Amino acid sequence: MSENNPTTTPDFDSYFGTAKYESGPTTTYFNPEMGSNVFRIAPPVKSLRTTGQWNVFGAMHYGYTVPSTKNPEKPFHKPFVCIQKKNYETKMVIEECPECTLIERRTRAMEAAQLAKKQELLSQGVSEAAAEEQAKNSVKALSRWFFNHNLDRKNYMLAKKDTGQWGILKLGIKALDAMRTAFAEYKKKTDKDALDPREGVWVNIVRTGEGTKTAYTVEIVTEDVGGGMMRYKSGALKAEDVTAIQALPDLTTIFDRSRLTYAQIKALADSDNNPDVTTKVFARSDAPATTTTPAPAPVAAPAPVAPVVAPKPVAAAPVAPPVAMPAVDPKAAAIAALQAQLAALMAPPAAPTAPAAASDLDPDDFAKNFGLSN
């Protein structure tokens, strides 16, 4: 056989890979439901292994969507990370978040509308209590906007549900504080770490109430071993747990796909959820997002002003007799001013264009992951 026609088979395995046709695994997010919620919380792991940190905090803005080509009636919800930084001792905002600014402006507008309605009712002779109640009801339609534009502040941790499924558990500060207290009491009684991978324990997060009346209690799970004896239920991790945790994202990276720049968030806040703008903002981008507030534009020096020449004296025109002005009702004037302020604040701004980035949330999972009442 000629040297130009080798009989040896090429080593395809060292050159080519095997194609994948299925999508990658999705991460499950847990929100405590009403009643008991039993979980095994993971100890510090991955990039947090040496820090002792087992949860991270994140604040996510909701309220914006992009159209779905498959189902126009169910657009995709697109949450993004809040970039506001605040000095909580002085209450001063260090870095502005345009969406937070919009929420504050809308809040003032709704309060102005409620106050204007109350003043109007009082001027008509309605009692104080009735005017207050009717004024609250008059702005209920406006409050729907705040439901959609929720700022979801949660603490995230890797956790296994009692069904055996691993995912990321989202807890508000009240539930997290209750869990920390339960862990501290367990440590005091046993001198053991509740999250130890070899002999950790399960916790039961009990949720009661709704809305602002939601409350949480957390207790270490025990089990009956017979003879009237109880013991803490073992949460020792196994090899399959390690494999499941390895498939979960690092807690320090779970917000990376949901970060936007200041300019992108400003474009959304100014857009009133205009689909042309949201589609551009949330388009996939390989460029890393930054959250730096742009520096203010330099102020131009004032133009020189020409000297004013005093006019020549002119003979005074005859003065017309004064015209009687109608009396102004101070309450009516106050109401008119508040209504004008409301109209100015609620007027939809023009929709700008914007650059691209961030994450998506399937509409079927939106209500489950939103966690408004948690």
Image (spheres, helix red, strand yellow):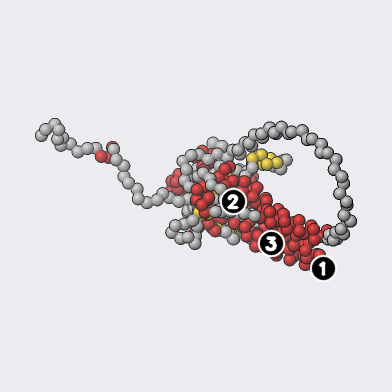
The label shown at residue 308 is: none
User: Is residue 221 visible from the viewing direction of this image?
Assistant: no
Q: Is 262 located above or below residue 121 in the figure? A: above
Q: Is residue 187 left or right of residue 136?
A: left
The label shown at residue 139 is: 3
Q: Amino acid at mark 2?
A: Ala
Callout 1: helix, strand or loop? loop
| Label whose residue precedes the other's in the sequence (3 or 1) | 1
The label shown at residue 350 is: 2
**x, y percentage for residue 49?**
52, 38
Q: CA distance from mark 2 to mark 3?
A: 24 Å
| Label whose residue precedes the other's in the sequence (2 or 3) | 3
| Label whose residue precedes the other's in the sequence (2 or 1) | 1
Question: Could you classify mark 2 by the number of other residues whose Cα lies within 10 Å: few (under 14), some (14-19), or many (20 or more)?
Answer: few
Q: CA distance from mark 3 to mark 1?
A: 21 Å
Q: Are marks 3 and 1 in contact (CB under 8 Å)?
A: no
Q: CA distance from mark 2 to mark 1?
A: 41 Å
The quadrant in which the C terminus is found is bottom right
The quadrant in which the N terminus is found is top left
Which residue occupies 46% across, 41% down?
286
Question: Could you classify mark 1 by the number of other residues whose Cα lies within 10 Å: few (under 14), some (14-19), or many (20 or more)?
Answer: few
**x, y percentage for residue 209?**
65, 61
The answer to which image quadrant residue 367 occupies is: bottom right
The label shown at residue 125 is: 1
Q: Nearer the viewer, residue 39 or 314?
A: 314
Question: Could you classify mark 3 by the number of other residues whose Cα lies within 10 Å: few (under 14), some (14-19), or many (20 or more)?
Answer: some
Q: Amino acid at mark 1?
A: Gly
**x, y percentage for residue 185?**
64, 47
Q: Amino acid at mark 3?
A: Val
Which residue occupies 70% across, 56% down?
342
